[in-house]
Image (cartoon, grey):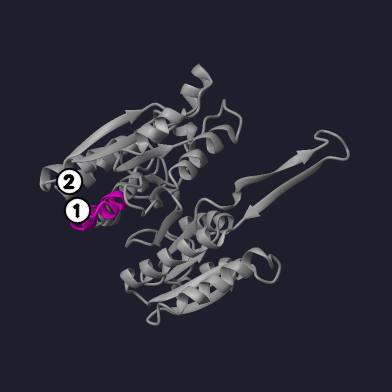
Amino acid sequence: MYKIGVIGGDGTGPEVVKEGMKVLKAISGKYDIKFDFIHYDFGGKRYLKTGEVLPDAAIEEFRKLDAIYLGAIGHPDVKPGILEKGLLLKLRFALDQYINLRPVKLYPGVDTPLKDKSPDDIDFTVVRENTEGLYAGAGGTLKKGTADEVAIQESINTRKGVERCLRYAFDYCRKRNKDKKLTLCGKTNVLTFAFDLWERAFYDVAKEYSDIKTDYAHVDATCMWMVKNPEWFDVIVTDNMFGDIITDLGAMIQGGMGIAAGGNINLDEGGTSMFEPIGGSAPKYTGKNVINPMAAICAAGMMLEHLGESKAADDIEKAVIKVVQNDMKSLSAGKMGHTTSEIGDMVAKEVA
C-alpha cells in the first residue's frame, strides 16, 4: 500500500492528474499494488480564498507519504512568484528533494522540430540539482523603486549539495546503461567560483566510476548540441538554473510539454519525492477536456519506477507509446483527435 499525496493544483492540473490516477488504478487492478490517495487543495484558489499557500503542518504530513503526485501550479489572478516560491520551491526545499530528474525521450510517431532526427537520436536524461543555486533565494534589494535601486541574487553552491547531485548522476548513468557517458553542463569560463566547485567535484567523484565516460560542455554549447546533435548526450548533470532552462528545450525536441514529465527526488531513507508534468497550468484550456494528459501519465510512471515498481512503470510507458503512435493525431491541446478523458481511457485500457 502506497500513500500518495495528490495535489491537482491550478488550471488543467486537476484534469491531467485525474487521468494519471485512472492509469494508476488500472495498474492496481493488474498487479498487487494498492494506492491510498490523499487529496490536497493547495494552489491558487485556496490562496485567493484564505491567503494561505502551504502551511508548515502540511509539510509534516507530506513527510509521512510515499510520494506526492502534482498537477500544475499557476493561477492568472495570483501574482507570479507567490505560488511558485511558496508552494513548489517550499516543497522542494523543505522535503530536500535535491534531484530534479528529466528524461528527454522522443517516442515513435511523435513529431520533433529537429530535421532528420528520430527516437534513436533523442534519448537522454537531465539530472538537475534542485535545492541550491540561484533558486535558494539568497540576496535582496536596496533603494527599491528609485533610480539607485540595487538587486542582488546569489547562487549558493555547497560541496555537499553538488557532490550528492553528481553521485546520483553517476549512479543513474550506470543504471541506465546506455552510452555510459555523463556530461557536466556549466559555465566555467565566466561563473568561475560556482563552476570551479562543480568541475572539481565532478572529476573527483569520477575517479570512483571508471566505467563512466565523462564530458564537459558550456551551457550555451549544450543548447546548440541539443538541437544539432542530441544523439551525443546520454546523461547531463547541471545546476539548478541551467537545468531549468535546458529541460524546457528538451521538452520541445521530444515533442512538447504535453509529453514531458519530471521527478523531484529525495533518495534518503524515509524521504518524500514528488512527480509532475513539467508544463504549466494552461488556464485557457481549463475545463474544456482538450489538454494532453500524457505528461501527467508519464509522471505517474516515473513515480512507480521510483517506488520500485519497475514492471508496472514499464507497462505504462509501453501503453503511452502505443496510444501516441496509433491513436493520437497530435500532442497539442485541442488537436489530439480525442478528449483528455478519452486519452486517459485508452492508456488505462492498454495497461490493463
Q: Is residue 313 left or right of residue 141?
A: left
Determine if residue 326 is in view: yes
Residue 128 image offset from top left, x and y in percent: 49, 58
Identity, as a three-letter code, of the amino acid under mark 2: Ile
The dominant secondary structure in magenta is: helix
Q: Which residue reaches farthest bottom?
A: 210
Identity, as a three-letter code, of the amino acid under mark 1: Ala
Residue at 31 percent of width and 52 percent of height = 302
Classed neighbour count for the residue bearing mark 2: other residues with Cα under 10 Å, few (<14), some (14–19), many (≥20): many
> Do residues under tags 2 and 1 come within 8 Å of each other at their CB atoms?
yes
Q: Tell me which numbered mark, 2 or 1, is placed earlier along the sequence.
A: 2
Classed neighbour count for the residue bearing mark 1: other residues with Cα under 10 Å, few (<14), some (14–19), many (≥20): many
Determine if residue 342 is in view: no
When the figure is inspected, residue 52 is found, relative to residue 337, above or below; the finding is above
Residue in the foreground of this view, choosing between 45 and 152: 152
> Is residue 329 located in the magenta-colored stretch of the structure?
no
Q: Which residue is mark 2?
A: 27
- Magenta stretch bounds: 301-316
Which SS class for mark 1? helix
Q: Which residue is mark 1?
A: 312
- CA distance for labels 2 and 1: 7 Å
Residue 14 image offset from top left, x and y in percent: 37, 32
Q: Is residue 215 left or right of residue 7?
A: right
